Image (cartoon, rainbow, N blue to C red):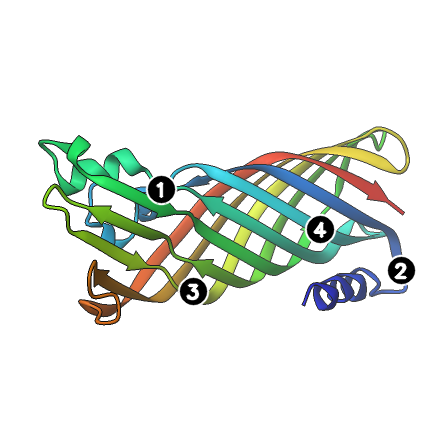
Amino acid sequence: MIRFLFMAILGVVSLGSHAQNIRFSLQAGAAVPLGEFAKDDVHPENGGFAQTGFDMKFLGERIFENNFVAGMNIGFSMFGIDKDALKKFINPDNPELVRAETQAFQNINLQFRGGYNWKVTNENLHLKPFIDAGFGVFNSAYYAIQDNGGDTYLKSGNTGFSLLLSPGLDVTLMVNDFVGITIYGTYQFANYKVEEEYTVSGNPTNPIYNQTQEYKYSSMCFGLGANVTL
């Protein structure tokens, strides 16, 4: 799978006979959940309770002579769960009586990129507005909640797939002709449908119920990166 993705990036960035540069970038920073994905005042079964997490991207881009950009973006974002908010929702009067174990939300993307590379000052400072569009894979969170009566309720997260769109902006300072440092920001959004299962302790093979949950996923990712231009 990894080999296929790498070959796909090389194929995209090699397109075109009028290309100027090939640029490879590694970026990492924060992933901030937004909207319903971050709400902590709805029932946990309806999504939400996501916390700020980690984002990482690998990019391969072709910069053409007219400064247009085409490429591919492989990324991964992970969001923790707000345990304190979850406990307060389950037992508002005595949240300390609730025990919660959680596993993070995860979002993986494979997207094509289109953009424009604007050289601002003596070709050292580059601004690049872009939009990424492609395939998103969302893993919903796992959590186990034990109430003050000793019963443990388990939500088993699952995987959903959807079209993922990500407009954004890269600001790059070229250290020399080959190496640059980038500040990036991007907004991601998609609607995922995930099959989820709910069970109670003592009877893990007999679910209380199953449901298809729709996650209105949205996040803002920003951070730093390094790139090499060939």
Front tag of 4 and 3: 3
- Residue carrying label 3: 159
Looking at marks 1 and 2 on the same chain, the residue that comes earlier in the sequence is marked by 2
Quadrant containing the N terminus is bottom right
Looking at marks 3 and 2 on the same chain, the residue that comes earlier in the sequence is marked by 2
Q: Is residue 197 left or right of residue 93?
A: right
Which residue is at 36% across, 43% downward?
50
Looking at marks 4 and 1 on the same chain, the residue that comes earlier in the sequence is marked by 4
Crowding at mark 3 (Cα within 10 Å: few <14, some 14-19, many 20+) = some
Q: Is residue 148 left or right of residue 111?
A: left
- Residue carrying label 4: 59
Q: Of helix, strand and loop, which one carries label 2?
A: loop
- Looking at the rendered structure, the kind of residue marked 3 is Thr
Front-lying residue, 6 or 190: 6
Q: Is residue 111 above or below residue 116?
A: below
Is mark 4 in CB contact (under 8 Å) with mark 1? Answer: no
**Picture quarter containing residue 127?**
top right
Looking at marks 4 and 3 on the same chain, the residue that comes earlier in the sequence is marked by 4
